[in-house]
Image (spheres, helix red, strand yellow):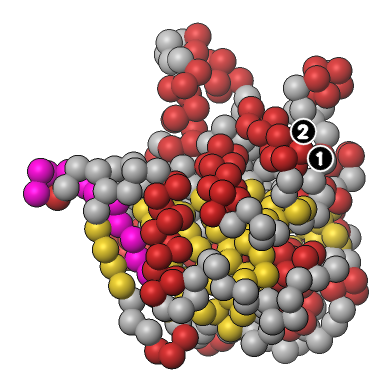
């Protein structure tokens, strides 16, 4: 690789979207960010329908955000649109300064425990994992295929959401079901949001002025999707999501932990199909199922106005969160810090306050004035005398993917 090749393009391909960032790893700067959404939706607004939208922001030299609408048929067309926007800023994919493309891949199973250069064999293995990630891996694969076609000469690297959690011991990763059945169908706890948990746990250690190997951290990634992890000395030893992202905390639209027999009951008594139950638990449950809203800001507004349904939803959300804090404190034995991250974790002070309320005996306290501060920087919100630090650490999954990608191609 050329010594001048210091840029990494990070692609996160969803089922109908592509998020991207171009970073210069030598300078430590972002050169451009963008989003193509509603891919495959082509009805023009004049006909009463939605259309695809591309938002592109060049960050170098004070560039202004550009937004365009129009039919983008598929991911190939979306990536070509991304390439065109980058080229308009002198940052095109053909640039010799581009070192690699890093792809977010949701599920890597047990095979992929680290970032991996993509070749045909790797792509085949990612395809084999589609049955355990049917909503995510197909879109990731489409993005990879398209990017490889556009730049077949360039290293393409897969960074897996599950990789950070592959250090979980078997007693944490195994479900208590028949071993032969579990192994035959790859049923175990994999965990997700791994790039976020890796980044935040490391940044929390830096905030404490320690090496990650010296710190035990409970990371609470609270967004529309939410997960918790117990990180001992830089290694994940437990996490709340399981075979799929459905397990664990109460989320925006997902139920989180639930008695498995609920699914049998809904099928036998309510006559619901497997697909209907899947949609219920993944898209119509969690906060939206409890109170009709999955935006924590709106829920807090309703609570302030005396809405009891919103209050109950919030209380259920917090109760589950506290249970995981307590459980992971027991798993770790010693906790040095609890770190809040992602959209809700970084911005919802009432959530952070409520999550540790009553846990002073465990060493968890927040300072009200520090907790109220809004900042994009990592910060402590616990008093100086606290036995356990409570931190707010903004996550940066794109930077984590870029760093892992760049490190691999330069190894």
N-term-proximal mark, 2 vs 1: 1
- Position above or below: 357 against 184: below
Residue bearing mark 1: 110
Quarter placement of the C terminus: bottom right
Mark 2 vs mark 1: in front:
1
Q: Is residue 325 magenta?
A: no
Name the one closer to the observer, 335 or 193: 193
Left or right of 410? Residue 293 is left
Residue 98 locus on image (x, y percent): 62, 71
Name the one closer to the observer, 119 or 368: 119
Q: Residue at x 66, y 33 (%)?
A: 127
Quarter of the view holding residue 393 = bottom right
Res 209 seen here:
yes
Residue bearing mark 2: 188
Quarter placement of the N terminus: bottom right
- Position above or below: 260 against 9: above
Q: Residue at x 75, y 81 (%)?
A: 3
- Position above or below: 1 against 121: below
Q: Identify the magenta region.
A: 46-56
């Amino acid at each position: 690789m050329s010594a001048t090749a210091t840029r990494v393009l990070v692609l996160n391909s969803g089922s109908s979207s592509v998020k991207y960032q171009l970073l210069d790893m030598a300078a430590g700067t972002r050169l451009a960010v963008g989003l193509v959404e509603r891919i495959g939706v082509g009805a023009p607004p004049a006909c009463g329908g939605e259309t695809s939208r591309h938002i592109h922001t060049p960050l170098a030299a004070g560039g202004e955000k550009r937004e365009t609408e129009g039919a983008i048929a598929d991911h190939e067309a979306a990536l070509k649109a991304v390439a065109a926007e980058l080229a308009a800023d002198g940052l095109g994919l053909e640039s010799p300064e581009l070192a690699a493309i890093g792809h977010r891949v949701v599920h890597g199973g047990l095979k992929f425990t680290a970032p991996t250069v993509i070749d045909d064999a790797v792509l085949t293995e990612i395809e084999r994992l589609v049955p355990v990630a049917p909503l995510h891996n197909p879109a990731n694969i489409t993005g990879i295929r398209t990017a490889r076609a556009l730049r077949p000469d360039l290293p393409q690297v897969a960074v897996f959401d599950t990789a950070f959690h592959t250090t979980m011991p078997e007693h944490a990763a195994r479900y208590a079901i028949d071993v032969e059945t579990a192994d035959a169908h790859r049923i175990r706890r994999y965990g997700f949001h791994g790039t976020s948990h890796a980044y935040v746990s490391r940044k929390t250690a830096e905030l404490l002025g320690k090496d990650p190997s010296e710190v035990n951290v409970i990371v609470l990634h609270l967004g529309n999707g939410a997960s918790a992890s117990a990180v001992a000395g830089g290694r994940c030893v437990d996490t709340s999501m399981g075979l799929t992202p459905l397990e664990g905390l109460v989320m925006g639209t997902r139920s989180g932990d639930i008695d498995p027999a609920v699914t049998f009951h809904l099928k036998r008594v309510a006559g619901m199909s497997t697909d209907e139950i899947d949609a219920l638990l993944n898209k119509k449950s969690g906060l939206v199922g409890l109170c009709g809203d999955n935006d924590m800001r709106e829920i807090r507004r309703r609570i302030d106005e005396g809405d009891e349904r919103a209050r109950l939803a919030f209380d259920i959300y917090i109760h589950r969160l506290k249970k995981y804090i307590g459980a992971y404190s027991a798993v770790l034995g010693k906790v040095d810090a609890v770190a809040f991250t992602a959209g809700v974790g970084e911005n919802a002070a009432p959530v952070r306050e409520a999550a540790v309320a009553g846990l002073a005996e465990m060493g968890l306290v927040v300072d009200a004035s520090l907790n109220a501060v809004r900042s994009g920087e990592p910060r402590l919100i616990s008093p100086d005398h606290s036995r356990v630090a409570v931190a707010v650490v903004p996550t940066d999954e794109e930077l984590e993917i870029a760093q892992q990608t760049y490190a691999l191609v330069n190894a």
